[in-house]
Amino acid sequence: MNIETQHHDNDSAGLVLSGRFDAFETDAFRATIDPLLASESTAKVRVTMADVNFIDSSGLAELVRSMKRAREAGGDIELHNPSDPVRVILELTRLDLAFTITSAE
Amino acid sequence: MTAPTSSSTYRSWADTPNTGPIAWSVVIPTYNESERVVPTIGAIAAHLSSLGSPWELIVADDGSTDDTVEVLNALGLANLQVLVAEQNGGKGSAVRRGVLAAQGDVILFADADQSTPIEQFASLLSCIEGGADVAIGSRAAAGAHVSNKSMARKVFSKGLNLLVRFGFGVHHADTQCGFKMFTTTAGRQLFQRQLIDQFSFDLEILYLAKKFGMRVDEVPVEWIDAPGSTVDPAKVAVEFLKDMAVIRWNDLRGRYRRDNR
C-alpha cells in the first residue's frame, strides 16, 4: 500500500492511501498517522481511500484504533471517498455506522 | 455525514434474490474464518456486482468451531448461500459441496483470504469463454506476480511442483492456487468423482481433468500472501505424498471411470 501525507488547512491533515490495506501495512499506517493524531494542531485527519482495492480485518482494526485515539483527543478521522469494495466491506462489518464517511464535493 | 453505502448494482445483488439463470457461482470454503471472510465477501461482491451478470455466492463451511456460520448468516445477503457441515471434513470436501450446489454456468472456487484478488476473475473467465473447461490461477506461470510469500513457502511450493511434474505427469506450474474456474459441466464431472477431501484435492481435480481430456488453461495471477495462513508445510507435504499414491491407486482400481457415478 502506498501512503501519501497531505497537509490541509490549520487544523486538518490528510492521508491518501492506495493499494491493499492488510496486516502487512498496519505498521506503516500507524507510523504515519500517529504523529498526526498526536499533533495539537491537528483536529481532524482525512483518510482518502478511493484507490484502496481491499482492506482486511487487520486494516479495519487499525482504522478503528486510529479513530478512537483521535476522538479521545477531541478530534476525528474521516474516511473520504472509499472505493466500492471498501464501502461494501465497511457496510458488511457495520463500520459504516461508526466512521464519518465523506464523498467528493 | 454518511455517504451512500455502495453502488446500485451491489445493492441490488445484496437485496434481491436471483430469479432467472445464473451466470456465475463463486464458491468459498471456510474453516474458522470469521475474521477473514467478511472483507473477502465484500471485495468479491463489489467487483462481481459491477460486472452486470447475475451471480451467486456459496460459502461452504467445513465445520467451523468459531462463529463463522453465525457471522455469515447475519450478513443478510439475498444471494449468499451458506452450506453448513456438522464436522470438519477437509477443504476438498467443502469445495465439492459448494461446486455441486452451484447453479451458475461458470463456477469459481476462491480462497477465503482474498490472496488472489477477485480482479483476476476476468482473466480466467476469458479462458472459459474461449473454450477451456477449466482455468486455474497460477503463481508460477510467466507473468504471475507474487508478494509477501515466505522463503519456506516458496521452497515448499517448488518441491511439490517438481514432484507433481515428474512423479505424476500433471504439467502445470502451480496446482495449488486457491483460485480455479470451471464450466458447470466440467465442475460437476470432476467433483462428482473427487475422492480426496484434504489439501491435495486440487491435484486430484487436475489429474482427473487430464484423464478426461479436458482443456485446462493456466493463467498467471497476482497473489499476495495473506497473514494467518493455517497451512503447515511439513504436515501438508507428507499428506501430499500420501495422496499422490492414493490417487494413482484409485485410478488403477477404476474409481475414476466416467461411468462410475
Image: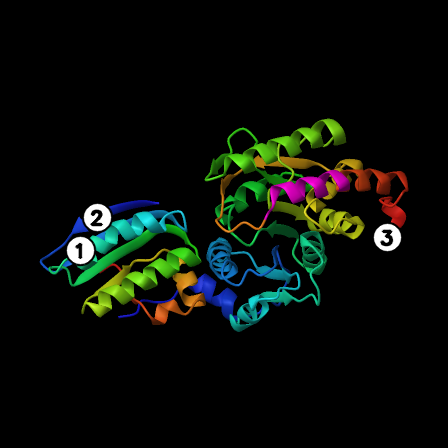
Q: Are marks 2 and 1 on the same chain?
A: yes
Residue B36 left/right relative to B184: left
Q: Residue at x 56, y 69 (%)?
A: B67
Q: The disc labelled 1 sits on which kind of residue?
A: Ala
Q: The disc labelled 3 sits on which kind of residue?
A: Arg
- Residue bounds of the magenta highlight: B231-242
Q: Position of residue B48 (x, y in %)?
A: 51, 55
Quarter holding the N terminus of chain B is: bottom left
The residue carrying mark 2 is A5
Task: Give how far apart the Cα atoms at labels 2 and 3 are.
Answer: 61 Å
Q: Position of residue A24 (x, y in %)?
A: 40, 47
Labels 2 and 1 touching (C-beta < 8 A): yes
Q: Residue at x 74, y 49 (%)?
A: B185
* Magenta-span inclusion, residue B234: yes
Labels 3 and 1 touching (C-beta < 8 A): no
Q: Are marks 3 and 1 on the same chain?
A: no
Q: Position of residue B164 (x, y in %)?
A: 70, 32
Q: Position of residue B209 (x, y in %)?
A: 75, 40
The residue carrying mark 1 is A13
Residue furthest left in the image? A10
The answer to whether residue B71 shows anywhere in this view is yes
Say which mark, if any, is on residue B261: 3
Task: Give how far apart the Cα atoms at labels 3 and 1 are.
Answer: 64 Å
- Crowdedness of circle 2 by 10 Å Cα count: few (<14), some, many (20+)? some
Q: Within the image, what quadrant is residue B124 found in?
A: top right
